[in-house]
Amino acid sequence: MISQFKQLDYRNLSFAIISGFIMTAAFPKTGFDFLAWFAFVPLIWTLNQTSTAFTTGCVAGFVHQITLVYWLTTAMHEYGHLPLITCIPLLILLCLYLSLYTGIFCIMVKRLCPTPGHLILVPFFWVALEYARSLTQFAFPWELMGYSQYLKLPLIQVADITGVYGISWLILLFNVAIVCFLLHTTRQTWQTHPVSIKMIYVFLGGVILFFVLFMSYGLYRIATINNHIEKSDNKLKVATVQGNIDQAVKWDETFRTESTQKYLHLSMSENIQDADLIVWPETAIPFYIQQDTKLSQLLRSFINDHQPAFLIGGLRYEHTSSSSWNFYNSAFLLFPGATNNQAYDKSHLVPYGEYIPFQTVFPFLKKMVEAVGDFSEGTTFTPLKWDKYSVGPQICYEILFPNLSRNLVQNGADILVNITNDAWYGRSSAPYQHFSMAVFRAVENKRSLARAANTGISGCINPFGKILTQSQIFVDDARACQMPVLNETTFYARYGDVFAIFCSIVLMVSILVRFFRYRL
C-alpha cells in the first residue's frame, strides 16, 4: 500500500479526499444530506484514471471515517482515562480498518466494471460491502450511506422492504449516473470505452424510474399508516426522561442517591403525569435493583405509588451453576403490583467497552472505558410485557443492528424502545448520528419507537419515521407523546436482509464471471 501511495498524483489524491469529506458532510451534525447524492462522483471519476484504485479508495474511506467518528477519542480520553497518545492511534487503526471497505469497493469498480454498461453493478457492490460491515460480533455499521436520508420520509419508506440498504443502493445508482453523464458530456471514455448517449438514457432513466417508484411507494405507505393511525384508538402515551447525569460522577457512591432522586423528580413532571409508560435511559439506576437496599426500596415504593409502567436501564447479576457470577447491562420493566423483575439483557456488547474479547489469549488487554465489570451477552429477544402491551427494548449500540429489532417485533413487540447513555461522546456529532439511525428501526418494522438518553437526544418516532418530539443535548428533560400501536408485520420484519443478500450474490457472480473470463 505504501508503494502504491507514492504513485498517487495530487489530482487523484485530492479527488479522493474531497469524496471523503462530502460523505461525512451528508450526516448529522453537519447534515447536508443532499450531498450524499454526489459524494461518490469525484471518487468514481478518479478510478477511471488511476492505477492505484485500492489506495485511492482507502484514502477516501479514511478521510470519511476519521471525520465521522472523531468523537471516539472523547470517550476513550475523557471517560476511559486513556492518554491522548494512546487514543489517537486507536482511532486511526479503527478508521484504517473501515477504510479497507472503500478500498475494496474501488478495486471492484475498477476490475469488475471494464465497460460503462458494467457500472450498473456499482450500487450492488457498495451494498454488499455495507452488509459485510454489519456482520460478526466486531461489526461497526455506523452511519451507512442510506442513513443520511433519515429526514426524507417518503424516500425511506422502502426500508420496510429493503432495509436501509435500499436507500444506499439508490444513492450509488444516482452517483454512477452523474459520472456517466459527465464522461459523455466531456467526451471522455470509461477505461477506453466510450459512453454512448444510449447509455446515458439508460442510467438517467433508471434513476428516475427507481426514484419515482421509491417516492410513490413511500407516499402510499405514509398515507396508509396515517389513515390507520387516525382510525385506531390503540395508542400509548410514552414519556422519556433525560436525567443529564454527568458521566464523571455517575458511578460515584456519594452521588447515587442524588442521581436516583433526580430521575424520580423528573418522572413527576406535570407534562408526563398521565403517561402509560415512562422510560429512563441506559444504566439510569446506579445500583443493583435485585438487592434489598434503601435505594431499591425507594424506587419500588415510588413505582407502586404511581400508575405508569417504567422501563428503566440498570445492571443485573445472575448466579450460575458453576458458582460464578454473570453481570448484564439490562432494561427492567417495573409497574405497580409486579411480583417479579422482567428484564431484557443487552445481547450485542461493545468490544473493549463492555467486555474484553480474547482476554484468555491476550490477558494484557484492558477495556477502553470504565464499567462495573465484564458483561455477559443476553441470549433472548423476548419483549417485556405488562397489561396488554409488549415493549421491545434496545440498549444503546444495539439500535445499529436491524436484526435485533426484527427479532423483537417477530416475538410480539408492540413498540420499540431505545435506551442509551451518549454522555460518553460529549457535545460532538455522535448523539445526532446515533439518533438518526433509530429512525430506520421504526420505518423497517412500522413500529413506534421511543428513545431515552442520559444526556440526549431523547424523543419519540412514529411508525413511518416522523420525529414527533426530541430533546436538546445536555439538558434535564421529561417529555411525552402519543405513540400509535400497530400490529402489521412488514416484509423486512418477516424476511430480513434479502435485498442485501441479493446484492452480495450479484457481487459474487460478478467475481466468478470475471475470474472465468480471465482464465479463458
Image: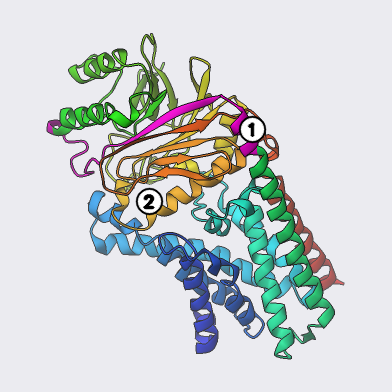
Q: Position of residue 464 (x, y in %)?
A: 58, 42
**Residue at screen point 26% across, 64% down:** 85
Q: Is residue 447 above or below residue 178?
A: above
Q: Tell me the tag on residue 431.
A: 2
> In this rendering, does residue 113 appear at all?
yes
Q: Is residue 378 above or below residue 50?
A: above
> In this rendering, does residue 9 appear at all?
no
In magenta, the rendered stretch is: 225-254
Identify residue for label 1. 228
**Residue at screen point 56% across, 71% down:** 39
Q: Determine the image quadrant of residue 334.
A: top left
Q: Tell me the tag on residue 36.
A: none
Q: Say which element carries label 1.
A: helix
Q: Determine the image quadrant of residue 430.
A: bottom left
Asked if residue 234 is among those painted magenta in the image, a careful observer would answer yes
Q: Position of residue 197 (x, y in %)?
A: 82, 82
Position of the C terminus by quadrant: bottom right
Please state which of residues 338 and 402 is positioned toward the viewer in this rendering: 338
Q: Earlier in the sequence, mark 1 or mark 2?
A: 1
**Is 294 displayed left or right of 385 in the figure?**
left
> How far apart are the two marked residues, 1 and 2, measured between alpha carbons?
32 Å
Please state which of residues 138 and 151 is positioned toward the viewer in this rendering: 151
Front of the two marks 1 and 2: 1
